[in-house]
Amino acid sequence: MRYAVLVTGPAGAGKSTFSNGILTHLQTSKRTGHLVNLDPAANSDAFEYEPAIDIRDLVSLDDVMEHLGYGPNGGLVYCFEYLLENMDWLEEELGGYEDDYLIIDCPGQIELYTHHPFLPTLVRQLQRMGIRTCAIYLIESQFMEDKYKFFSGVLSAMSAMVNLEVPWLNIMSKMDLVTSNVEDKGSGRNGIRTRKDIARYLEADPMLLVSAPGSREEQTERNSKFHALNQAIVQLIEDHPLVKFLALDLTNPDSIESVLSHIDFVMQYGEDEEPKEPADLDEGDFAEME
Ligand SMILES: Nc1nc2c(ncn2[C@@H]2O[C@H](COP(=O)(O)OP(=O)(O)OP(=O)(O)O)[C@@H](O)[C@H]2O)c(=O)[nH]1
Ligand SMILES: [Mg+2]
């Protein structure tokens, strides 16, 4: 069985850094993983590991912009359409991997996840090739700075989940920039929060959008033209509680391990493996039991 993890999320959320981190973690756990770069505009410096498969070998954004006169966004769409027309290239490249995790580092254009048909088509192709596929969606801890920004992230995650229809994990990245320790202001670049406060964000508690009764914030919100919109968003998230976040702190190996075990779980990793028989049942095979 082959496994593919699509690493998705808005620009700069930490997709490439996470892909590197998870590959290092797989390696130290004596498991195999390979990087697949799906970003035709990627800068090679971003990769700690040489991509095993790289869309830039098929088509690169620079060439498309230079030779066809597209701008960066139109060029990106052209690259993906070109890939979809040349899926036999990808199928051939994917041929040789067995029982491995393919970590697919995707580009950060949010349109790709919310309404462009490229990723759903790609997922269907991967599934047709017998590759078990899941997606993870990263938003960065800076989104917890402002509750309105945070809920725009929640809605983008929701929209991407509905668009892709594969097993899914949402991840709050860059948690090393958030601290619950008031003394440790240095590491709290994205805010100092109490654990309870962090938990409300990770659970995407829609009541965060509702201010305390009688507070000045509530008074201004009540008069605000966005009040009804906020209420509708609260209702939507309450009715469809699809989004929760796993906290990811890449500086903490336990945090990476926890994310990997969630990925293994949604992938049902290893469930189809046959138990390995010892090669021959001679005494040497039982040395550890003696
Ligand atoms: N402190 C901290 N910084 C991070 C972390 N992950 C990524 N960064 C930084 O965030 C910036 C963007 O990281 P990338 O991994 O390139 O993000 P990306 O999502 O791949 O970006 P695009 O491919 O451009 O969409 C870089 O400057 C990283 O060093 C993290 O866990 N902690
Ligand atoms: Mg990247």
Image: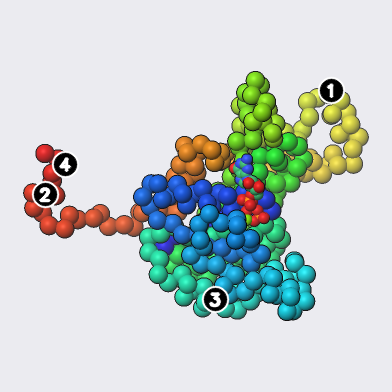
Q: CB at mark 2 closer than 8 A to ligand 1?
A: no
Q: Where's the N terminus, which quadrant? A: bottom left
- Mark 1 / mark 4, whichever is N-terminal: 1
Q: Quadrant of residue 228?
A: top right
Q: Nearer the viewer, mark 3 or mark 1?
A: 3
In front of the other: 288 or 147: 288
Numbered tag placed on residue 25 in the rendering: none
Give the secondary structure at mark 3: helix
Q: Is residue 203 left or right of residue 210?
A: left
Q: CA distance from mark 3 to mark 2?
A: 48 Å
Three-letter code, disc 1: Gly
- Mark 2 / mark 1, whichever is N-terminal: 1
Dot 3: within a 10 Å radius of its alpha carbon, few (fewer than 14), some, or many (20 or more) residues? some
Q: Where in the figure is residue 232, as x and y percent of width and height?
A: 77, 44
Q: CA distance from mark 4 to mark 3?
A: 48 Å
Give the secondary structure at mark 1: loop
**Residue under label 3:** 87
Q: Tell me the quadrant of ligand 2.
A: bottom right
Q: CA distance from mark 2 to mark 1?
A: 75 Å
Numbered tag placed on residue 284 in the rendering: 2
Q: Which residue shows up at 40% across the image and 66% down it?
A: 97
Q: Is residue 128 left or right of residue 231?
A: left
Dot 1: within a 10 Å radius of its alpha carbon, few (fewer than 14), some, or many (20 or more) residues? few
- Mark 3 / mark 2, whichever is N-terminal: 3
